[in-house]
Image (cartoon, rainbow, N blue to C red):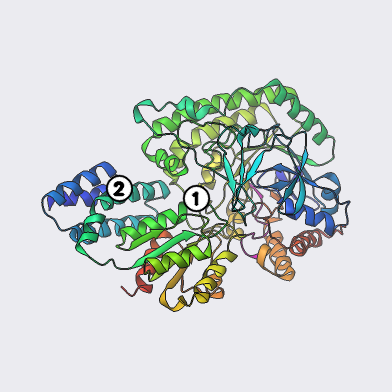
Amino acid sequence: MLELEKLHEAVIEGDWKTAAAVTRIAIAAGVAPLTIVSGFLVPAMDEVGRRFDCEEYFVPEMLLSARAMKASMEIVRPLLTATGAEPVGRIVIGTVKGDLHDIGKNLVSSMLEGGGFEVIDLGADVAPERFVEAATVHKANLVALSALLTVTMPWMKTTIDAFQDAGIREKVKIMVGGAPITQQYADAIGADGYGESAGSAVALARKLAAV
Amino acid sequence: MRTALNHREPDRIPLDFGSTTVTGIHVTCVAALRDYYGLPRRPVKVHEPVQMLGLVEDDLRAAMGLDVTGVFPRKVKFGVPAADWKEWNFRGLNVLVPGEFRTRTEPNGDILIYPQGDETAPPSARMPAGSAFFDSIIRQPEIDETKLDPADNLEEFGPISEEDLDHIDRSARAASTSGYGVAAGFGGTGFGDIANVPAPGLKNPKGIRDVTEWYISTRTRRGYIHHIFERQCEIGIENLARIHARIGDRVDCIYVCGTDFGTQTSAFCSVATFRELWFPYYKRVNDWVHKNTTWKCFKHSCGSVERFFESFIEAGFDIINPVQCSAAGMDPAALKRKYGSRLVFWGGGVDTQKTLPFGTPEEVREEVLRRCEIFAAGGGFVFNSIHNLQAGTPVENIAAMLDAVHEFNGVSHA
């Protein structure tokens, strides 16, 4: 387990090369992929989120840790899929139509992936019908919408309405976030939750997914 | 405005809209305001095409009751001169854009724009269908750590040309005789401004140009960033000296840097990182300005940035904008109490994320009056909304905002 402790440390320190190397060694040594994720990556990203929330970490450190986590996850993910292990939830995420800002969305996406969720990241400038289609195809139970601009915020409601129109609104929980978004706005457009920060988004997703 | 900048209480709060690229008005709102005030209908010039800011001309400035005018660089951010204006249909609104402003509309309605108007170069920015602003297209060459050269990130920073100097000279002379206060943006001293890192004005940017990679570099390639800032600082000060030799003290303040250090709830870096990586360069620029000119130094940073204010002051910044009161730890009364005698608040007048675009005119009025009450005492306040007036803002709300400032000032306008 000594080597795997290094994985925990590498993710927290944002050292993607070590994270990938330790993951390969662990896999070769027969460590179960699920153990790597739930035993090391998830706790490490929880710690990264905690440091971000208490302002020991800022955006650059978060991005580095996310990169390290992803380097490990890229090795583990195909093996996880092969074992048929179920993620804690499947979440479709994207920045809404007309909005190309994705730094915040990417951080949330990484934190969710590091939190044990299967994340289907649709990128930025995502039309409502693409969210609906992805949620349907991937059988997602969660949808996360991001917006930075006041001019694109209304697309959040349009997207939620699209789920209603497609008859699958009850099958997914929809969470929203982004600089101009507030709890009040989330309530007004019928979202199921609002996350103020990347760290709180993970806690919210866990709550909504009833994990 | 000068009285306010010197922390003395003026007879009325000075107002700015349009003197800088962070205190501006979206072109659609400029057109709406011209209609609202019954001014002659004509296509509005888009003088800052990234954010699609419309030029506030003298007739609108007078109708709105504004007190500040601007001096802008010769070229816009896409590397084309703000000249030879031509008409352009922007989503049904006829506007004027620079002659070398060249775009292509994709089948899905997205608009792509070319750097330096060169249609053979890869486009440098995209305006998605349904959006009202351009965002840079990231053109990040593959990074070979062994070959990274800070000079690659300095391509856009060079000695100012005679042509640029002539333009600034002409603009400053006109502005200084206009009777308004003058804010100037010369460019070149924005250290790591994330809006400029992707270099929307360059045809084939080299170095670190990806936004994520840049943020990561402030942690992992700090020597490289220092090297860029060091050289940029030298060039910037040399350019300021040449500009000052031409225009003297015809401008009141200069826009030094727009790098955002705050997010809605936190910061992009710690105070310790700020002091190590940015502070020395800001201090050198501001010290030069204060030693050699009468200009005040203007710093823009969105978000939750109160933690940096002592360092901003120590680095020589005189003015802070946009004073995002909606961000964490940015309570206006607390800011005024703690920093009001040392920093000019140029902004903070009304929230542009919620109240102004989505509130009622009465809600706008109430918020503006409250903010004026807080910020006006003792001077040190130039009224501006929190950042540019965004597309989609109801013109009635903009008028309610202006009316409230005039109401507070005890004067009537329009």
How crowded pointer 2 is (Cα within 10 Å; few <14, some 14-19, many 20+) is rated as: many
| Residue B14 visible in the current orientation | no
Q: Which residue is mark 1?
A: B307
Give the left or right position of residue B236, taking residue B370 as reference.
left
Query: In this view, which residue lies farthest toward the left?
Result: A29
Q: Which mark is residue A125?
A: none
Q: At 52% across and 51% down in the image, what residue appears?
A: B305
Given the image, what chain letter belongs to the residue carrying mark 1? B
Give the left or right position of residue A176, taking residue B375 as reference.
left
The image position of residue B275, as x and y in percent, is: 46, 39
Q: Which mark is residue A68?
A: 2
Using the image as rendered, state which of residue B281 and residue A205 is in the foreground. A205
Q: Is residue B284 above or below residue B395?
A: above
Secondary structure type for disc 2:
helix
Using the image as rendered, state which of residue A73 and residue B309 is in the foreground. A73
Q: Are marks 1 and 2 on the same chain?
A: no
